[in-house]
């Protein structure tokens, strides 16, 4: 039976560390502030934004919600972002994705000041990640690295297989694992003989977004399995990509959903907000 990786507990430790850094900044008269933009009334986005606001409260970060109508245009959203870019009291800006279809997501990501880009989605931050330059790092992938480190699981020399090649998870995850000297394979929906590839993974990371996608026959005995998926099953219950009950019997370590990677994403967002505040005062 696998050991469960307790993302909730690790996230709590990260947030306590962030709270100490916030106190230190406040002694210098700086109150880190995160602006979160939410557009429309998608219930999942609402839940994520509420979680982010709660984490701000817990760590002493000031949160500022900007809630916009679902009919908002690209131009209107760009104006809001420009105001936040110019606002010296705001250190981090996050625009909750996905955006309504009339909004040009690429333009929005490009408009957020790289110094305030706590998602690290801006091309400059993506480029820095490729170069391995220390900077704001994407929250979900960096949360996965912190989890592995926390449990003392080495990455160097390991076969790391990521399923999924999104800009938010798959691609940046590959870069972070590579920085740590992992041997990285990125599999995706067009990959031939997926099972043969995932079966070689010492560290298997699933970011597919399909319940039940990763079955026990895809997993090597003793592998570390990280489930980045956040889905709803047929009963509407929160679940990941991994068939937890069967894979748990084969893996050495496994993250649950909920309570695995999800809380880490939010904790790393807090970490990035403090980092952004520090960058802006250097
Ligand atoms: N929607 C789903 N994940 C994310 C994320 O990490 N950041 C933002 N801004 N939106 C998301």
Image: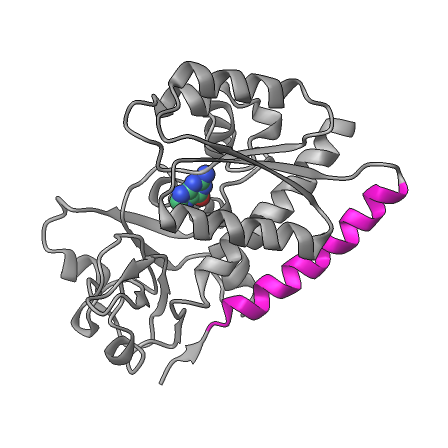
Q: Is residue 236 magenta?
A: no
Q: Is residue 77 above or below residue 203?
A: above
Asked whether, in this view, residue 275 is left or right of residue 119, the answer is right
Q: How many numbered marks are there?
A: 0
Q: Is residue 91 above or below residue 102?
A: below
- Which quadrant would the C terminus be assigned to in this image? top right
Q: Of residues 262 and 61, which is closer to you in this image? A: 61
Q: Of residues 108 and 63, which is closer to you in this image? A: 63
Q: Is residue 194 above or below residue 169?
A: below
The image position of residue 184, as x and y in percent, is 34, 49
The image position of residue 104, as x and y in percent, is 34, 21
Q: Is residue 172 visible?
A: yes
Magenta range: 5-27
The image position of residue 35, as x and y in percent, is 60, 35
Q: Is residue 12 magenta?
A: yes
Asked whether, in this view, residue 16 is left or right of residue 140, the answer is right
Asked whether, in this view, residue 267 is left or right of residue 209, the answer is right
Residue at position x 25%, y 63% in the image? 200
The image position of residue 131, as x and y in percent, is 50, 30
Q: Is residue 173 visible?
A: no
- Which quadrant would the N terminus be assigned to in this image? bottom left
């Amino acid at each position: 039976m696998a050991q469960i990786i307790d993302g909730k507990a690790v996230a709590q430790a990260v947030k306590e560390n962030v709270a100490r850094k916030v106190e230190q900044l406040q002694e210098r008269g700086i109150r880190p502030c995160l602006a979160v933009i939410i557009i429309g009334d998608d219930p999942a986005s609402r839940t994520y934004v509420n979680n982010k606001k709660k984490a701000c409260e817990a760590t002493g970060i000031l949160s500022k919600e900007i809630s916009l109508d679902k009919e908002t245009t690209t131009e209107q959203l760009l104006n809001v972002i420009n105001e936040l870019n110019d606002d010296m009291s705001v250190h981090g800006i996050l625009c909750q994705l996905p955006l309504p279809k009339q909004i040009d997501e690429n333009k929005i990501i490009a408009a957020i000041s790289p110094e305030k880009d706590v998602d690290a989605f801006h091309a400059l931050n993506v480029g820095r990640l490729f170069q391995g330059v220390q900077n704001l790092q994407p929250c979900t992938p960096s949360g996965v690295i912190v989890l592995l480190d926390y449990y003392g699981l080495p990455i160097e020399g390991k076969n790391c297989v990521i399923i999924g090649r999104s800009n938010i998870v798959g691609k940046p995850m590959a870069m972070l694992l590579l920085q740590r000297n992992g041997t990285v394979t990125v599999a995706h929906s067009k990959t031939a003989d997926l099972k043969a590839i995932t079966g070689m993974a010492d560290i298997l990371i699933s970011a597919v977004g399909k319940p039940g996608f990763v079955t026990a026959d895809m997993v090597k005995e003793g592998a570390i399995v990280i489930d980045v998926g956040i889905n709803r099953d047929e009963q509407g219950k929160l679940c990941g990509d991994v068939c937890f009950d069967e894979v748990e019997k084969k893996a050495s370590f496994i993250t649950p959903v909920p309570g695995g990677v999800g809380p880490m994403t939010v904790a790393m967002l807090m970490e990035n907000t403090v980092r952004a505040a520090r960058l802006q005062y250097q």
